[in-house]
Image (tube, rainbow, N blue to C red):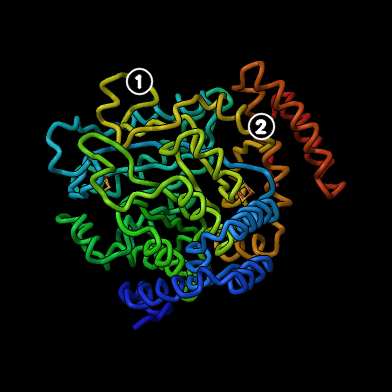
Amino acid sequence: MYNPQSLRAEEFIDHDEIMSTLEFADKHCGDAAFIDGILDKARLRKGLDHREAATLLSCTLPEKTAALYALAEQIKKDFYGNRIVLFAPLYLSNYCVNSCLYCPYHRQNRHMPRKKLSQEDIVAEVTALQDMGHKRLAIEAGEDPAMNPLEYILESIATIYSVRHRNGSIRRVNVNIAATTVEDYRKLKEAQIGTYILFQETYHKESYARLHPAGPKHDYAWHTEAMDRAMQGGIDDVGLGVLFGLESWRYEFTALLMHAEHLEAVHGVGPHTISVPRVKKADGIDPGSFDNGLDDDIFARICACIRLAVPYTGMIISTRESQAVREKVIRLGVSQISGASRTSVGGYADPTPEDEDSAQFDVSDRRSLDEVVAWLMGMDFIPSFCTACYRQGRTGDRFMSLCKSGQILNCCHPNALMTLKEYLEDYASPDTRALGEALIARELEKVPSAHVREIARRNIAAIAQGKRDFRF
Ligand code: SF4
Ligand code: SF4
């Protein structure tokens, strides 16, 4: 029985409710007046429920698609402005006891070179990432209680935060590790992580069991209820995501929004971020073997519909996607992207061809961070290395109330300019730097508050003199 307030996975991700939602969507998706009603509701910027969003996603009327895309772009601007936050994944270990059929790190893969970074290796990786200009990382590790126990993850987080190379520092570590206990989540919180991210992979229970035939991840309820345990453990910001392509995309999209509604209903705070990865090629993994692939147009519709359904939630797209796809969806509501990623263990400090053999997936966008920064600015976005919110205590419901009232933009915009200035001073090529200085001068004039503008201007001048780490 569907119950968004239940703590049981099968009740807040109720299969019958999803199937009935998809029937509802089929019935109404060709009704232009009905779709207009949904778009009108979305214009209020308070979000959509999963039935409305699923109906909008199913609608292929061309004029409604144009309206959907225009509204998604506008809502993104209203909530987050034109900044795009940059981050990089850092793979700590590819030891894993699970058997996920779509991932080359599964335990049956005997020819995958297994690696686990030592603390010295982590210092080398973080130094290389700092030398690129990164300030925000998402750490990743396979599930292996013997090789990657929580103590290892906690020690690694402390090491990452401790590295200070030239003007570099990692100021926010988001964590993407396997579902765990409330007690472990409490320890992660104490280690000052940013967001806890866990992809559901698929919400379809039967498919989930088939795709995860063995290992602790096989337990659907344990995995699906992880965000509730994380929040019980004090983690305010959690990041959802599904691996699109494993199951029907309409099913996953509906369930993803039901999960967001559940978090809001139980904890009063929806997901901090939603990631939208698609199945990609990797060692022994052929995306074509999963028969639920989605084309770039559907992918773009999904991004736009998420933006309308949960306007307050950050949306993340990784280097799994090509430059062309990223260019398309970045306008439709994506707020965070990875840049210059390596998806192998030890790939930043020592990128070798063998290293590619241990990658979790093929990276489609292989540009350097400097190229990504210049590309964003060329499209009139502000590349941002901001990590201010959790460091200022703006997490959970505090963050959400600022975001829902549209006020977070007053922090995002000047913080983007100040952190971009740091990047230009310390890491940018001469061409990127020239582009960036012009963009900062233009954008400073757009800061609405004269007081904030003056402080930002002063801080940017101080950064040119060698000072670092200002934030609103
Ligand atoms: S997806 Fe995660 S849990 Fe599954 S095999 Fe890969 S690393 Fe292990
Ligand atoms: S001010 Fe907060 S929401 Fe905005 S970019 Fe910085 S950390 Fe993100």
Q: Residue 457: percent from the left, percent from the top?
A: 81, 36
Q: Is mark 2 within 8 Å of ligand 2?
A: no
Q: Nearer the viewer, residue 289 or 108?
A: 289
Q: Quadrant of residue 442?
A: top right
Q: CA distance from mark 1 to mark 2?
A: 29 Å
User: Is residue 233 left or right of 168 when viewed as pictured?
Assistant: left
Q: Is mark 1 within 8 Å of ligand 1?
A: no
Residue closest to the eye, 137 or 27: 27
Q: Mark 2 or mark 1, which is nearer the start of the sequence?
A: 1
Q: Is residue 393 visible?
A: no
Q: Residue at x 45, y 31 (%)?
A: 365
Residue at 42%, 54% in the rendered image: 196
Point out residue 237 in the picture as x, y percentages from the top left corner. 49, 58
When the figure is inspected, residue 9 is found, relative to residue 388, above or below; the finding is: below
Q: Position of residue 452 (x, y in %)?
A: 81, 46
> 425 or 23: which is nearer to us?
23
**In this orientation, which residue lies closer to the viewer: 428 or 118?**
428
Residue under the image location 45 percent in, 41 percent down: 318
State the mark number for residue 337.
Answer: none
Q: Label 1 belongs to which residue?
A: 350
Q: Mark 1 and mark 2 in contact? Answer it, CB < 8 Å.
A: no
Tell me which residue sits at (35%, 73%) in the image: 19
Q: Up-down: is 348 above or below 321?
A: above
Q: Is residue 353 above or below residue 221?
A: above
Q: Residue furthest bottom?
A: 1
Q: Classify 340 as above or below 31.
A: above
As helix, strand or loop, the secondary structure at mark 2 comes to helix
> Does residue 304 appear left or right of residue 9 in this picture?
right
x then y, percent, for residue 266: 46, 75
Going by the numbered disc 2, the residue's amino acid type is: Met
Label 2 crowd (10 A; few <14 / some 14-19 / many >=20): many
Which label sits on residue 377? 2
